[in-house]
Amino acid sequence: MAADSIEREILIEASPEVVWGVITEPEQISRWFSDEAEVEGRAGADGALTWKPGGRGGEKELDVIVPIRVVDAEPFRRFSFRWNHPEGSAPDESNSALVEFSLIEEADGTRLRVIESGIDAVTHDEEDKARYLEDHEHGWEKHLGEMLDYVASKSHGATR
Amino acid sequence: MTAVAVAEDDALWAAVADPTRRRVLDSLLEHGEATTTTLAEGLPVTRQAVAKHLAVLNRVGLVAGRRRGREVRYAVQPERLDDAAEAMARVAAQWDRRLARIKRLAESVQAEAEINFQHQQGECNDRSQDWNS
């Protein structure tokens, strides 16, 4: 796992088909992610995620519209997209973050794993970074894979 | 969030994103205080490379050097390390919340589908009873 990536997962008591619908259908995406979503569950599709004032993104004065491009869509198994690239430009490693969902069927339901990488790429531009951080500002709990464990444990060790 | 804070955060992030620099930090934390030479001995990189990494870490305030006679001894600045951990943590926290919402949504869709299915099954049973009677 790259240093500027995070990996999280959760076990969901639902079939991969149901979980797939929740993460790829615009009307469902607007219930867990942005306030509005224009997304197609098809590789190469360009779309947009919109956060409205007073919506999930919190105190904003204007709509925040974030471009998104679907990279890979393998029904019920894998869904990935790039986002946070400058509007109008093609997303790549240098200007966008990559979000990869994988769905693994288990006896009790579906294990949903998400990896977001290239976070560093979207934080080079000052304005984007400010917006990105604003979006991510609420609730700074601890946790994050090897990087966080490393930094946290070491920093406490050093304080002693 | 001010532009200055954002820029600082950015540099801090980049500083800890490099695996070798993390090893340098790691080694430094183990030693408490160390010179470039001591650090290079325990790492598979040259003294020059260690010096470069220390310069980056020093610039963002993650380590500080103290001159002692002819040598400079470096030590980790724990407060800055906490900032770095926090910066990495917020993105993860955001995904935790999104995943929790996805779980809630998917499970309610699933439960609804199962109720509908049982309902249909029930209707079938009713019908078969009609036929049998």
Image: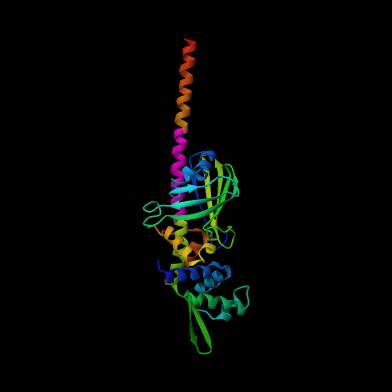
Q: Residue furthest bottom?
A: B69
In the rendered image, is residue A136 in sight?
Answer: no
Q: Position of residue B82 (x, y in %)?
A: 43, 68
Membership of B106 in magenta stretch: yes
- Indicate whether A18 appears above or below B66: above
The quadrant of the rendering that contains the N terminus of chain A is bottom right
Q: Position of residue B19 (x, y in %)?
A: 57, 67
The quadrant of the rendering that contains the C terminus of chain A is bottom left
- Indicate whether A73 appears above or below A117: above
Q: Residue furthest top?
A: B133
Q: Residue furthest front?
A: A88
For image coordinates 45% across by 74% down, the residue present is B77
In the rendered image, is residue B119 in sight?
Answer: yes
Membership of A132 in magenta stretch: no
Q: How many marks?
A: 0
User: Of residues B33 and B17, which is closer to you in this image?
Assistant: B17
Magenta region, main secondary structure: helix
For image coordinates 47% across by 46% down, the residue present is A29
For image coordinates 46% across by 44% down, the residue present is B103
User: Of residues A128 and B45, which is closer to you in this image?
Assistant: A128
- Indicate whether B110 appears above or below B9: above
Q: Position of residue B59 (x, y in %)?
A: 50, 77
For image coordinates 47% across by 42% down, the residue present is A27
The residue range painted magenta reads B94-112
Q: Position of residue B100 (x, y in %)?
A: 44, 48
* Quarter holding residue A63: bottom left
User: Of residues A37 and A72, which is closer to you in this image?
Assistant: A37
